[in-house]
C-alpha cells in the first residue's frame, strides 16, 4: 500500500536547498505499486517524479503530488566477450552505480563519475561530462506508461537523445523504472578533454579507476558539495551557435573555448567562460550567487527561494546576451 503524506517539506530533498513544501507526497518502493500510482494520479493530475532532487528548481509551494522514486536493484549480465548488459533500477544513486560498474569491470561511464542524482534521471537529461554522454551506453529504458498502465521498453533510438535532452524529458506520461546499459569489458578511456588529458598523461598504464579518480578530483576542485552549499552543478547549457557567430566572437575573444558538434554549421561554446569573462565569478546578491571557483554554477548560500534564484539567473542571462548576443538556457527543470 502507498503511504500518502501531506504538507511535506522538500527543502532537504533538493540539492539547491530551496525552500519548498508539497501538498502530497508518496514513495515508489516497488513495481507492484505502479498501478496504485496510476490510480493516485487520476485523483492528483498535477504531479512530478522526484529522484535525487539534483536537477530541480522547486517552488515555495507545490500544490500537487510528489512521487519519490525509490526503486532499487542492479544486475550484471555478460552477453559476450566484449560487453556486459547492466540493468539498474531508477532510484539507484548514480555515482554509486558508476563506482560499482568500475569495480566489476563494466566500462564506459567513468567520465560521468560524481554527477549527482539517480540512475532514472540519467536518460531523461542525457547527462554528460568530459566528452561523454550517457546516451552512448544506454540500450533500453524501461518505463511505466501511465496511460496504458503497463511497463514498456523504449529503445535508445526512440529516446531521441540530444544535448541534455530526450523524448522523456517533457513527457510525464512515462515513469522511468529501469535503465539497461551496454558497457565494455575492456576499458576504452576517453581522456582527451582539457585538464583531464593533462592529468592522465602523468599516469603510466592508466586504468578506468584512475580515470574515475581523476574525474572525481577535478569535479571536487571546481564544484561545491551540495551537502555544504546548495547547487545543481552546471546551471546553464553550453550554448550551440552558428559557426559564423562563433568565428566572429573569436576575433574579439580569441580565448573563448569552442567545441565541434554533429553539425558542421554549429559550434558549442563554453557558457562558464562567457560568464567568467564578464568578471561575474563570485558575484553575489543576497543569498544567491555564482560560485567563486566555477562561473557555470549558481549557488544558494542560505534560505533562498525559486523566485530569488530565477531573478538572479535572468540577470546573468541579460548580461551575457548584451555582451555576446547569446541566449543562455537554464539546464535544471523549473517546476
Image (tube, helix red, strand yellow):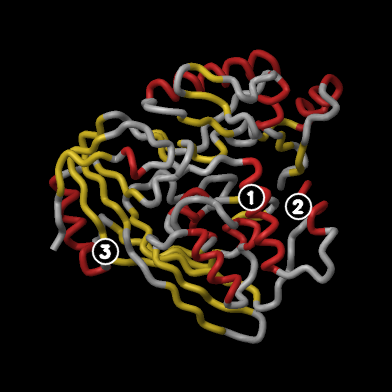
Numbered circles on residues, count? 3
Judged from the image, the secondary structure of the residue bearing numbered disc 2 is helix
Residue at 82 percent across and 64 percent down: it is 203
Residue at 74 percent across and 60 percent down: it is 190
Residue topped by disc 1: 129
Q: Quadrant of the C terminus?
A: top left
Mark sitting earlier along the chain (3/2): 3
Q: Quadrant of residue 254?
A: top right
Asked whether 206 or 70 is in front, the reply is 206
The crowd level at tag 3 (other Cα within 10 Å; few <14, some 14-19, many 20+) is some
Residue topped by disc 2: 196
Depicted 173 relative to depicted 149: above or below:
above
Depicted 2 relative to depicted 303: above or below:
below
Farthest residue toward the bottom?
A: 81
The crowd level at tag 1 (other Cα within 10 Å; few <14, some 14-19, many 20+) is some
Question: Is the C-beta separation of discs 1 and 2 under 8 Å?
Answer: no
Cα separation between marks 1 and 3: 30 Å
Cα separation between marks 3 and 2: 38 Å
Q: Which mark is residue 29?
A: 3
Residue at 64 percent across and 25 percent down: it is 281
Depicted 188 relative to depicted 173: above or below:
below
Amino acid at each position: 500500500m502507498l503511504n500518502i503524506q501531506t504538507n511535506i517539506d522538500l527543502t532537504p530533498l533538493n540539492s539547491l536547498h530551496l525552500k519548498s513544501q508539497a501538498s502530497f507526497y508518496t514513495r515508489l518502493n516497488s513495481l507492484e505499486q505502479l498501478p496504485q500510482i496510476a490510480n493516485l494520479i487520476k485523483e492528483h493530475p498535477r504531479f512530478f517524479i522526484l529522484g535525487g532532487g539534483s536537477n530541480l528548481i522547486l517552488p515555495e509551494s507545490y500544490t500537487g503530488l510528489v512521487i519519490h522514486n525509490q526503486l532499487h536493484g542492479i544486475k550484471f549480465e555478460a552477453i559476450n566477450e566484449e560487453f556486459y548488459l547492466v540493468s539498474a533500477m531508477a532510484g539507484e544513486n548514480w555515482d554509486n552505480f558508476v563506482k560499482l560498474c568500475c569495480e566489476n569491470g563494466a566500462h564506459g561511464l567513468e567520465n560521468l563519475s560524481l554527477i549527482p542524482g539517480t540512475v532514472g534521471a540519467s536518460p531523461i537529461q542525457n547527462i554528460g561530462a568530459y566528452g561523454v554522454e550517457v546516451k552512448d551506453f544506454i540500450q533500453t529504458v524501461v518505463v511505466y506508461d501511465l496511460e496504458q498502465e503497463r511497463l514498456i521498453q523504449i529503445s535508445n533510438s526512440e529516446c531521441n537523445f540530444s544535448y541534455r535532452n530526450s523524448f522523456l524529458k517533457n513527457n510525464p506520461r512515462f515513469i522511468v523504472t529501469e535503465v539497461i546499459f551496454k558497457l565494455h569489458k575492456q576499458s576504452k578511456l576517453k581522456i582527451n578533454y582539457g585538464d583531464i588529458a593533462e592529468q592522465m598523461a602523468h599516469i603510466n598504464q592508466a586504468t578506468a579507476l584512475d580515470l574515475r579518480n581523476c574525474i572525481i578530483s577535478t569535479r571536487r576542485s571546481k564544484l561545491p558539495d551540495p551537502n555544504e552549499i546548495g547547487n545543481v552543478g552546471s546551471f546553464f547549457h553550453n550554448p550551440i551557435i552558428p559557426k559564423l557567430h562563433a568565428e566572429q566572437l573569436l576575433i574579439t575573444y580569441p580565448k573563448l573555448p569552442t567545441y565541434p558538434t554533429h553539425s558542421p554549421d554549429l559550434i558549442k561554446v563554453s557558457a562558464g567562460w562567457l560568464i567568467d569573462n564578464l568578471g561575474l565569478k563570485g558575484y553575489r546578491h543576497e543569498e544567491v550567487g555564482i560560485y567563486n571557483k566555477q562561473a557555470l554554477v549558481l549557488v544558494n548560500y542560505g534560505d533562498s527561494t525559486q523566485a530569488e534564484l530565477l531573478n538572479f539567473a535572468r540577470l546573468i542571462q541579460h548580461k551575457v546576451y548584451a555582451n555576446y548576443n547569446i541566449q543562455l538556457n537554464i539546464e535544471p527543470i523549473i517546476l
